[in-house]
Amino acid sequence: MTRDRITVPLHAIAHGRAGDKGNRLNVNVIAYRTEFWPILLEQVTEARIAALFAHRGVTRVVRYEMPKLQALNFVIDDALEGGVNSSLSLDTHGKTLSFLVLDLPVELPSHIQSSAAAVRSRTPNFDPVMGGVDNE
């Protein structure tokens, strides 16, 4: 980490949603603000997500970019221990797995650190059920 960059968890600049289709997990990562979108594109990669889920035996990760929404959609194969009807997991739908992604460390350049701090300062307003923070 250089002097003009800081490392923060991804949830400081983005929120997420997760769902399932069989043994396939979908995780969306959505930037809170426009200035965070390039950080998502650069640092939240297929390789990093695959490494994050390696302990679950994933076989493939595909990233889809949705620039008009400033969001990424990750489709992660074989992440749900067989899926809803086969898994003994407490979270067979994988709904909580977006939090694993949102803990991913990202580096912020100095020119957007104040934006991230503003979002973090509003964390008490974060609604984990509906997702996101009211950005005015």
Image (cartoon, helix red, strand yellow):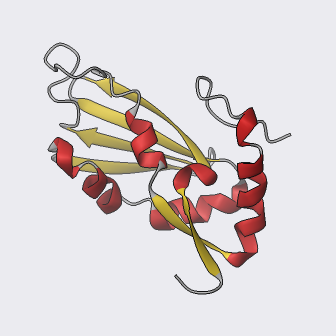
Report the residue at 77% width, 43% height from top.
122
Report the residue at 38% width, 44% height from top.
74
The quadrant in which the C terminus is found is top right
Q: Which residue is at the far right?
A: 136
Residue 95 occupies which quadrant of the picture? top left
Q: In this view, does 132 lie above or below 106?
A: above
Report the residue at 38% width, 36% height from top.
97
Residue 135 occupies which quadrant of the picture? top right
Question: Viewed as shown, does residue 135 lie left or right of 44?
Answer: right
Q: In this view, does 108 lie above or below 98?
A: below
Which is nearer the eye, 17 or 6? 6
Q: Which residue is at the far top?
A: 85
| Image location of residue 56, percent across then percent down | 19, 42
Question: Viewed as shown, does residue 71 lie left or right of 53?
Answer: right
Question: Viewed as shown, does residue 75 lie left or right of 69?
Answer: left
Q: In this view, does 88 lie above or below 14?
A: above
Report the residue at 71% width, 59% height from top.
116
How many numbered marks does the figure carry? 0
| Image location of residue 121, percent across then percent down | 76, 49
Q: Which residue is at the far bottom?
A: 3
| Image location of residue 8, percent across then percent down | 57, 62
Residue 58 occupies which quadrant of the picture? top left
Q: In this view, does 87 lie above or below 5?
A: above
| Image location of residue 119, percent across then percent down | 74, 50
